[in-house]
Amino acid sequence: MTLRTLESLGSLAGKRVIVRCDLNVPLQDAVIADDGRVRASLPTLNALINEGARLVICSHLGRPDGAPDPKYSLAPVAQRLSELLGKPVAFARDTVGESAHDAVAALEDGEVAVIENLRFNAGETSKDAGERRAFAEQLAELGDALVSDGFGVVHRKQASVYELAEILPSAAGQLIAAELDVLDRLTENPERPYTVVLGGSKVSDKLGVISHLLPRVDRILVGGGMLFTFLAAQGHKVGSSLLEADQLDTVREYMRIAEESGVELVLPTDVVVASKFGADAEHVITPADAIEETPFGASGLGLDIGPATGARFAELIRDSKTVFWNGPMGVFELAPFAAGTKAVAQALTDVDGLSVVGGGDSAAAVRQLGFTDDEFGHISTGGGASLEFLEGKKLPGLEILGWQ
Ligand code: ADP
Ligand code: MG
C-alpha cells in the first residue's frame, strides 16, 4: 500500500483538521535560531487554508519532562508561523485543556490555531500504549481528521504520530510526501557515483546506517566526532578527542566489509587539534596519525577535519551524481572549527545530480554558514527519520498512513 495523501480525506472545507507538524526548532533565549522546519510545513498548511479547513496545529518542542515547562513553549513558533502565513494564528496555552478547546471552537473556515507543546503531556511519548492511546483520544476531540506532516518524528511511535492516526481519518501531508520522494531516489537505483558523508557527534548513532549503506554506495566519507573511533580502530592515538571504545570492533568490521566489497571508506588524513573545547582555544593542524604529537600532547582535542581532508572530501563529492550528507565535519558552532563543514557544504552545492542534507544540526550548519536552501537538492527536516529510512527500518508513523 502506498501513503494516503491529502486527497484521500475528501473535502476538508469547514472541517477541523489536526495537523501534526514538526516545529521543533532550535531556540536561543526564546528566539528561533533556525526556522527551517516552520518554513517546511507551510505548503501543507497553505493548501489546507485555501481549502477552507480549520487548522489545529500541534507539535513537540525540545524534551520537556511530560509536564508544562515555559522554556519549551510553542508560543514563539506560533508567532513566527503567523508572520510566515501572513495571517493571525491563535495560540492555546494548553494542549488538550480548556484553552485548546476554546481556541478550536473559535476557529472559522481557513483560520489557524496552534496548541501548546504535545510533550507537556506524559501520554505523548509514554512507553505504555494505553497511556498513549488515552492522550490520543483527548487530542482526537479537537479535530475531525488528522494530517500527519511531521517527518522528523515518523520513526517514533508516539501518541500524535501513531495512535491519533488510528483514531481519526488520517493522511500524510506534502512535506512527508516530498521527503519520501527524495529518500526513494536515494534507495532505488541512485545515480552513480553515490557518496555518503557521515559526521556528527556519535558513531553509535550512525552505525546502523553505515552497515546498511555499505553494500549500496560507492564511497563513505567519515568526519565529525566519529572519525576518531575509526582512527583508533586503525591503531592511532586520538588524544582527548571523542572516542567510543566499545565500538572499535564494530568499526573494524565495517572497514573489513568495505575493503572486501570495494567500497571506498575514506578517513581523514589530517585533523584540527585544539588545546581545549572553546572558540578561543589554541589549535593546530596535524596528520591524522600524529594527533598526540602536537604541543597539547594527549590532552589535544580533535575538533575538525583538516584542510587537506576537506579538499579531498570536496573533490570526491563533486565527482558524485548522488550525495547524502548527515553530520557536521567538526564543531561548526565554534568558528575556528567550521572550515571542514563549510568545505563539504560548498562541494554539495556544486554537485551535478542529487545532493541531500539530512539532520537537524547539519541543516542548521549549512544555514549558519551562509548557504541557502535552494543551493542543495534537498534539505531534510528529519535526521533520525531519514537515517532509519536509509537503514531500511519500518517507520511506525508512515506505516499507520498506509506506507509499506
Ligand atoms: P545531525 O543533527 O545533523 O544528525 P549530530 O547530532 O550527529 O548531527 O551531530 C552534530 C554535532 O556534532 C554538532 O553539535 C557538532 O558540534 C558535533 N561534532 C562534530 N564534530 C565533532 C568533534 N570532532 N568533536 C565533538 N563534537 C563534534
Ligand atoms: Mg543532532
Image: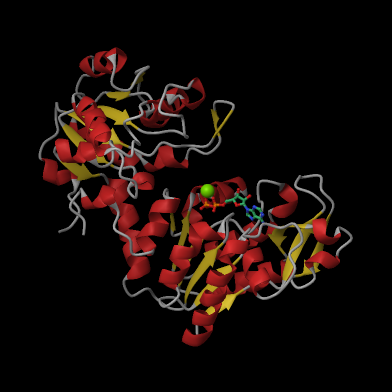
Compared to residue 115, the image places residue 146 above or below, namely: below
- Residue pushed farthest right? 295
The percent coordinates of residue 60 (x first, y second) are 39, 33
Q: Is residue 292 left or right of residue 184?
A: right
Compared to residue 228, the image places residue 62 above or below, namely: above
**Residue drawn where x is 23% and y is 14% of the image:** 106
Q: Quadrant of residue 103?
A: top left
Any part of residue 317 in sight? no
- Type of colouring: secondary structure
The percent coordinates of residue 391 (x first, y second) are 38, 64
The front one of 157 and 151 is 157
Compared to residue 348, the image places residue 138 above or below, namely: above
Q: Quadrant of the C terminus?
A: bottom left
**Residue drawn where x is 30% and y is 43% of the image:** 149
Q: Is residue 88 left or right of residue 171?
A: right
Any part of residue 356 in sight? yes
The front one of 194 and 289 is 289
Q: Is residue 136 left or right of residue 28?
A: left
Q: Quadrant of the N terminus?
A: bottom left
**Residue drawn where x is 80% and y is 57% of the image:** 300
Compared to residue 390, the image places residue 38 above or below, namely: above
The percent coordinates of residue 129 (x first, y second) are 25, 39
**Residue drawn where x is 14% and y is 33% of the image:** 12
Mark count: 0
The percent coordinates of residue 333 (x first, y second) are 66, 46
